[in-house]
Image: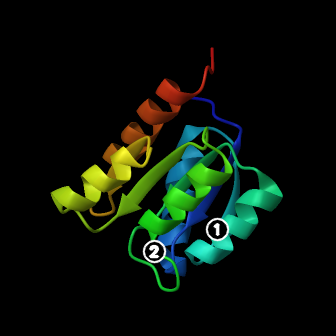
Amino acid sequence: MNFNGMIMLVDDEPHIRKYVSLILRQLGNPTVVQAGNGEEAIAVYQRENPDLVLMDVNMPQMDGIATLKRLKEIDPNAVVIMLTSLANRETIEQALELGAANYIRKDTPREEIAKSLAETIDACFDLG
């Protein structure tokens, strides 16, 4: 995989953003921008127009579901992968119904996260 686009990481925990940034290096050489909450994510998205968004569900101020809904209003073609520790069926279904491209649990082993990200990126972008 050689993904060199821009990825926005949205998570209120800096150590999670750092951990996911390390995983993203396995995908190529993406530019990574970050946001610490949903409101910040909307501002960064509008300013940077990233190719892909990796977003936590559980955040202060504006949660990931509300942020996903708002991002899809701004850009119906936004590619958003939910990355979270929450795994209840209702939240997963709601995220997918709102247009999330995938849903990955944070407690998934690192190699599996990288594989899931690669598969989703492959499905959403023509990298050939």
Residue 108 in sight: no
Tell me if 47 is positioned left or right of 113 in this view.
right
Q: Residue at x 45, y 41 (%)?
A: 117
Q: In which quarter of the image is the C terminus?
A: top right
Give, as a three-letter code, the residue at label 1: Ala
Eyeballing the image, is 104 above or below 124? below
Q: Which mark is residue 81?
A: none
Label 1 element class: helix
Eyeballing the image, is 26 above or below 12? above
Give the mark nearest the N terminus, 1 or 2.
1
Residue 62 lies, in percent from the top left, at 51, 78
Residue 112 lies, in percent from the top left, at 32, 44
Q: Residue 41 carries which label?
A: 1
Give, as a three-letter code, the residue at label 2: Asp
| Residues packed near mark 1 inside 10 Å, few (<14), some (14 to 19) or many (20 plus) | many
Tell me if 6 is positioned left or right of 112 in this view.
right
Q: Which residue is drawn at 50% across and 58% down?
A: 68
CA separation in Å, label 1 and label 2:
11 Å
